[in-house]
Amino acid sequence: MQVSVNPGDTFLDRMISMVEGAKRQKTPNEIALTILLVALTLVFLVVIVTLLPFSVYSVETAKLGAPITITALVSLLVCLIPTTIGGLLSAIGVAGMSRMMQANVIATSGRAVEAAGDVDILLLDKTGTITLGNRQASAFYPAPQVTTEELADAAQLASLADETPEGRSIVVLAKQQFNLRQRDIQALNAQFVAFSAQTRMSGVNLGDREVRKGAADAIKRYVLGQGRPFPQAVADIVEKVAKQGSTPLVVADSGKVLGVVELKDIVKGGIKERFASLRQMGIKTTMITGDNPLTAAAIAAESGVDDYLAEATPEAKLALIRKHQAEGRLVAMTGDGTNDAPALAQADVAVAMNTGTQAAKEAGNMVDLDSNPTKLIEIVETGKQMLMTRGSLTTFSIANDVAKYFAIIPAAFASTYPQLAALNIMHLKTPNSAILSAVIFNALIIVLLIPLAIKGVKYRPLGAGVLLRRNLMIYGLGGILVPFPGIKLIDLALSAAGLT
């Protein structure tokens, strides 16, 4: 006889399915740079390939001069394709990962850090990130015809196996107010029900007795499912506690609602100013919490976040990220639990806490060894510094090519068109000297720019227009001016050494 057991779609199965379906997108800057490098390379390849037959045809037609040499064409290709920025991209990426290590953050790649610089939206967990965490039970509010001691007794029973700070604080508060001591768990023959992101409640079974505590809407569904009422007086208490910015936990005993436990949390000092700085950088902040909408709204207003997602489930987090990405936004998120894994796998920048689950760490593309969720702000600043560095060096590289045109093109075609010698504004000694000087300068400039790529351009929280003008003035103009004296000095050195 064969028995087949089908447990159905478990929580872990759904988490795995959502993680496998998640996919990170490429950032706009990454796409733009790839298109630029590929386009420039293809253009110069096509130009170089067609130059030789064009030169041969010109010489045969005019019966004058000599065709361009293969050496000149290879030199032209080496100097004109985007070798400078291509050679520095790896250095910029490694430098970004190194800066993350100094901040006690492990990044899986330089791309992960760089993506942080493009982020439009930050999703932050409320507890421990925006608030101090470790919410503490502060009061018991019984339902009509229920004593406060009855509520405290049931709340303590439901919290005996709850090792969270909230659970322990309920046990302590019941002990302090009513001298309710911890029970003998084995003697009670208790079967504990763990909290899950789906049920959003926990508790204990004592034979036929079921004691539960959890979010108001979760307990409401639970008691209504048993055909028992949810008192309006308790709903009013829940609303009152939530409007104060506290978290209401409703307690039920065998389908009967006993009342509310108030959990208090405190918003971190200075967090509102940090969110204001992010807003100036054009980054929207969204708080994610399992609290009800009233509590979430109160904390959001106090902390200064731009938006919030209340009663968040793993599916809701994933859907929110995909919605923002579909609008062309880049999303960063912090998380530490298995229920955060799908959202972390989908987010463009996903920072998992070192104290979190293995699933969260594997789904993220960074791990914060200090488990400090607010470090996401530092990561964004580092990413923006990487983008500024890459943009500055790309501007310099493109401008740098302009000077090389004046060194190589007149020299390369002087034998075919002697009139082009008029463009030799640097007065380089010979065509061979011009070509060799440009090739040497091209190799040296990459080496000289590596320290800048590693150190990075200093981060300044400026607008895109201001940064563009600054880059054009410093790196654009510098990229045009530097090669002229550089190539000329190399040409003089080669001539003095008798190498050309």
Image (cartoon, rainbow, N blue to C red):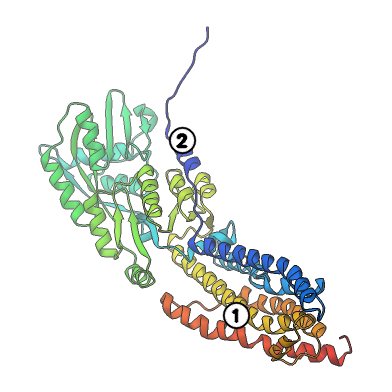
Q: Is residue 451 left or right of residue 165?
A: right
Q: Is residue 467 left or right of residue 424?
A: left
Could you classify mark 1 by the number of other residues whose Cα lies within 10 Å: few (under 14), some (14-19), or many (20 or more)? Answer: many
> What is the distance, in whole Å, between disc 1 and disc 2 at their CAs?
54 Å
- SS for tag 2? helix
Q: Is residue 255 shown to the viewer in this render? A: no
* Label 1 with label 2: CB-CB less than 8 Å: no
Q: Nearer the viewer, mark 1 or mark 2?
A: 1
**Which x, y percent locates residue 479?**
61, 83
Q: Amino acid at mark 2?
A: Leu
Q: Nearer the viewer, residue 482 or 362?
A: 482
Mark 1, residue position:
399
**Which x, y percent locates residue 126?**
34, 56
Residue at screen point 29% across, 65% down: 304
Image quarter for residue 108? bottom right
Could you classify mark 2 by the number of other residues whose Cα lies within 10 Å: few (under 14), some (14-19), or many (20 or more)? Answer: few
Mark 2, residue position:
12
- The image quadrant where one finds the C terminus is bottom right
Q: Amino acid at mark 1?
A: Ala
